[in-house]
Image (tube, rainbow, N blue to C red):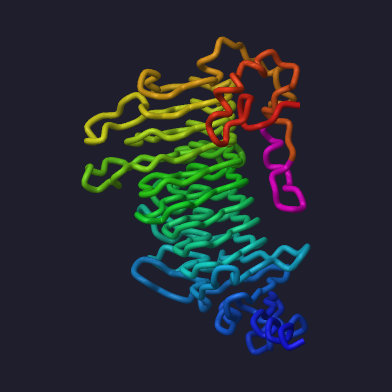
Amino acid sequence: MIFALSSIGYSRTYYVSPNGNDTNTGSKEEPFLSLGKAQNILSAGDTVYVRGGTFLITEKQINNYSDIWASVIELSKSGKKNKRINYWAYPNEKPIFDFSAIKPSNYRIKAFNITGSWIHIKGIAVVGVQVTILTHTQSECFSNEGSDNIFEQLSMHDGQAIGFFLRSGSNNLILNCDAYHNHDYTSENGKGGNTDGFGNHPSAGSVNNVFRGCRAWFNSDDGFDCINASEATVFENCWAFCNGYSPDFKSLGDGNGFKAGGYAYRPPSKTPNPIPRNLIRFCLAANNKANGFYANHHREGNDWYNNTAYKNSVNYNMLNRLADNSNDVPGFNHNMKNNLGFAARRAEISNIDSTQSDIKNNYFSLSIAISADDFISVDFTELSAPRKPDGSLPEVNCMRPKSTCKWIHAVETTNSTSVIGIRPFLGCFEPK
């Protein structure tokens, strides 16, 4: 009994509700109104349940102005290993944080700024994040600088901001999150050329970050963007589709599905050493305005395993840049195995040096013919279907090969399974 009582004392539960009040006790019957109030009193191991409904955030709730940033909700308190601080949606409820009234002049906005570590945020939606600056800028729904955090079942949509932005921190997992219908129509030319679904730009030393089961669609720029990343990141079982377009298919920003690297025109002294290799596996890129999978002038190769591309302008574009930043060149040092594609609008694959890359068992390097009849469906609208109750990706038939198609066994099983994470079939979906 003494042990049980002491354990209870180290793990407490609080509640936050749109109908709460920060003068309340934080109990289920008397919830707080703000996450900030809950954070002030919680400790490692505690859980905050966020009740369903809409939280209308106002400018008086901006927590911090620093340099060019206005950070609205700051989660700076850290948990510990095996004692995370949890900010979870109450079971079977959907809390929505609406930032449409946050418009501080001349500031970029971070709706949620996470600087703490050992935090788990689950089931929260962020909408309406604004951009107020007319020149080159960006706002962010979730901005992470902590380590050992889990971001699960978050949805960031119908705003002008990047959905999720990983700035720094190690060992973070971004799991089963959605970023969609985000378009900065305010800055520069209104095309939204800086509004990605997921921005992955870890600083030096920020290692072992993973994006798993995430989706990005109808974002005005790219689905997943790794430009200027100083460390490698893993993307697995993620989908990017219809990026670079508005929902009525007006042309907007760049529109790449997975932009896996690159350093713009930085001189060698301003780029990481060594250049990181990103791992992109079991991912799907469909109907993006530009490239499905894009090396983006990277100065090293990446690892591309069991991905599927459909109806992008270019399905696989492996363009690299020389280490001295002097010229773009066909992609080198890429590992490409078991990738599948179909119906690119311009080219199935471009800018690859097959003599300087390890290319094996890809649809473009095998003597096979692929048609729409080889797939159960080629309807990419399936990809935005609701997630399963546990938050995992929906079961879809789009670009899932039929088990009867002739090229299913084109993969050499012995060779393909010698690399960790490779499946003995082409593409990201198991045939059925």
* Image quadrant assignment for residue 309: top right
Which one is in front, 354 or 399? 354
Residue 258 magenta-highlighted: no
**Residue 124 percent across, percent down from the top left:** 64, 62
Instruction: Identify the image quadrant of residue 343.
Output: top right
Residue 339 place in picture, x, y as percent: 55, 26
Residue in the picture at 31% in, 26% down: 329
Queried whether the magenta region covers residue 383, the answer comes back as yes
Q: Nearer the viewer, residue 159 or 174?
A: 174
Seen in the picture, residue 409 relative to 75 is either above or below; the reply is above
Q: Identify the magenta region.
A: 379-394
Total of numbered circles in the picture?
A: 0
Looking at the figure, which quarter contains the C terminus?
A: top right
Residue at 55% over, 74% down: 58
Depth check, front residue: 132 or 209: 209
Q: Tell me where residue 15 sits by quadrant.
A: bottom right
71 horizontally vs 14: left or right = left
Q: Which SS type dominates the magenta stretch?
A: loop
Foreground pick, 48 / 348: 48
Going by the image, does 85 lie left or right of 255?
right
For image coordinates 47% across by 64% down, the residue present is 146
User: Height in image: 378 above or below 269?
Assistant: above
Residue at image coords 53%, 54%: 163
Q: Give the percent coordinates (x, y) of residue 115.
A: 46, 68
Q: Is residue 250 positioned above or below 114 on the image?
A: above
Can you say which quadrant of the picture contains the N terminus? bottom right
Q: Which x, y percent locates residue 298? A: 35, 36
Query: Left of 324 or right of it: where is 166?
Result: right
Q: Is residue 404 above or below residue 197?
A: above
